[in-house]
């Protein structure tokens, strides 16, 4: 669900509030701070298996075994 859909889902019932109810609820809505945007970070291991050989997922177990057996 995107932000636009969530906004619309909230807007529909709020649009039906009476003006008196809206005035009563508005201070509570304004007092509730908006949550911060999530921080997106790059993983330091991203691309570690990039070899240019296509899809390596079929050989991942073999590749890991080779890697760990060499480092021992």
Image (cartoon, grey):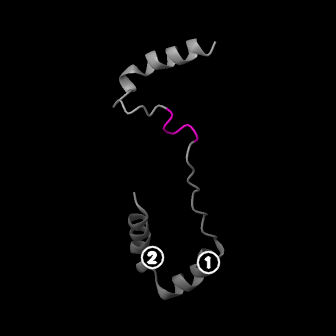
Left or right relative to 4: residue 27:
right
Q: Main secondary structure of the magenta part?
A: loop
Left or right relative to 25: residue 10:
left
Secondary element type, mark 1 = helix
Residue named by callout 1: 30
Other-residue count near label 1 (Cα within 10 Å), few / some / many at <14 / 14–19 / ≥20: few
Q: How many marks?
A: 2
18 part of magenta stretch: no
Q: Is residue 4 above or below residue 16?
A: above
Where residue 1 appears, x then y in whole percent? 39, 57
Residue under the point 47% across and 31% down: 49
Residue named by callout 2: 14
Residue under the point 39% across and 26% down: 57
Q: Which residues are magenta?
A: 44-48
Residue under the point 56% across and 86% down: 23
Q: How far apart, in angstroms, are the residues tagged by discs 2 and 1?
A: 14 Å
Where residue 70 appears, x then y in whole percent? 57, 14
Seen as rendered, the residue at the extreme right is: 31
């Amino acid at each position: 669900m995107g932000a636009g859909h969530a906004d619309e889902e909230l807007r529909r019932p709020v649009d039906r509030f009476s003006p008196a109810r809206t005035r009563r609820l508005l201070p509570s809505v304004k007092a509730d701070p908006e949550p911060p945007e999530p921080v997106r970070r790059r993983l330091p291991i991203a691309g570690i298996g990039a070899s240019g050989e296509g899809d390596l997922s079929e050989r991942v177990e073999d590749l890991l075994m080779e890697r760990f057996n060499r480092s021992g």
